[in-house]
Amino acid sequence: MWIGQPLSPETIASLRRNALEGLFGRRRGVLIGVVHLQPLPGSPRYDGEPVSRIYEQALTDAAAYAGAGFHGLIVENHGDVPFLKPDALGPETAAVMAIAAERVRVETGRPVGINVLANAALHALAIARAAGSAFIRINQWANAYVANEGLIEGPAAAALRYRHSLAADDVRIFADSHVKHGSHAITADRSVAELTRDLEWSLADVVIATGQRTGDAASEDEIDAIRSATTLPLLVGSGVTPANLPAVLDRVDGVIVASALKVDGAWWNAVDPERARSFARIAAAVG
């Protein structure tokens, strides 16, 4: 297969099974809810409370998503702001997240993903392997950008080798294109389409479009530019609300959502079960 000319990113992607279908049993209309963990031990806002309370809140939020009919979940250490670069993260973060993710998976029966901020791909893969998680989300999988944490480099080459060493090649990679919370001046001479094609070349399984920051919507122009550049499934990973959900689902294969479904629409609050149910009903009506 590899003799002769190198395969194009499009050919590589076409040889792989659609990751959304493999994980969620559907190619379109996928709903993924984010479980924002409360501040974890070792982070600035952790107040010393028993970690059991962190797990309890995670399970409450996960149950609200699952009860509304969401297809998958992501467990994320969003309460750990400001975030560390991957090399500075301690083992305590992975330890607590692995237990939280495993409990969420068992309690809900949904495929669970892991996002360790900021951009900690190896930590996420280790957690996924320990917790039986199905995928990880990585905000910068290829290339590099300047984030709040400093220079963030894409870990694809090292992460894929680490994944293989864990016998975890079945853990899928959900990768952001032109990710939020940062400056892309380093790659400003390359289009969003080119950056998206780099994700396929770097063996991502799903591409994610985002806005400028948490809760900001991705523009239609950027969504369309990403869509035109990849044969991989495409999700929108920020700024999706009940109001724009039908238009978003008309352009992409699914959404990742959290803030719009929290009490008062604030990411640090608990998931509002009725907001989650209403959101899922809108998605079902889109078809």
Image (spheres, grey):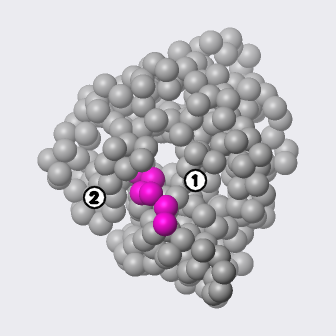
Residue 102 in the image: state x and y as whole percent: 58, 24
What are the residue bounds of the magenta stretch?
Answer: 15-20
Can residue 212 be seen here? The reply is no
Q: Which residue is pictured at 78% across the width and 28% down the height?
A: 92
**Left or right of 62 in this view: 172:** right
Of mark 1 and mark 2, the one earlier in the sequence is 1
At mark 1, the secondary structure is strand
Three-letter amino acid code at the position of disc 2: Leu
At mark 2, the secondary structure is helix
Residue 170 in the image: state x and y as whole percent: 58, 45
The residue mark sitting in front, 1 or 2, is 1
**Residue neighbourhood size for the residue with mark 2, other residues' Cα within 10 Å, grouped as few (<14), some (14–19), many (≥20):** many
Q: Is residue 37 above or below residue 87?
A: above
Residue 101 in the image: state x and y as whole percent: 58, 28
- Residue that carries the numbered disc 2 in the rendered image: 249
Q: How many numbered markers are drawn? A: 2
Of residue 199 and residue 259, the one placed in the foreground of this image is: 199
Determine whether label 1 and label 2 are within 8 Å by CB.
no
Of residue 20 and residue 93, the one placed in the foreground of this image is: 20
**Left or right of 197 in this view: 241:** left
Q: Which residue is pictured at 45% across the width and 53% down the height?
A: 19
- Judged by its main secondary structure, the magenta piece is loop
Three-letter amino acid code at the position of disc 1: Ile
Of residue 179 and residue 108, the one placed in the foreground of this image is: 108
**Residue neighbourhood size for the residue with mark 1, other residues' Cα within 10 Å, grouped as few (<14), some (14–19), many (≥20):** many
Q: Is residue 17 magenta?
A: yes
**Left or right of 156 in this view: 275:** left
Q: Is residue 208 magenta?
A: no
Residue 256, which numbered label?
none
Q: Which residue is pictured at 58% across the width and 79% down the height?
A: 7
Of residue 42 and residue 26, the one placed in the foreground of this image is: 26
- Residue that carries the numbered disc 1 in the rendered image: 173
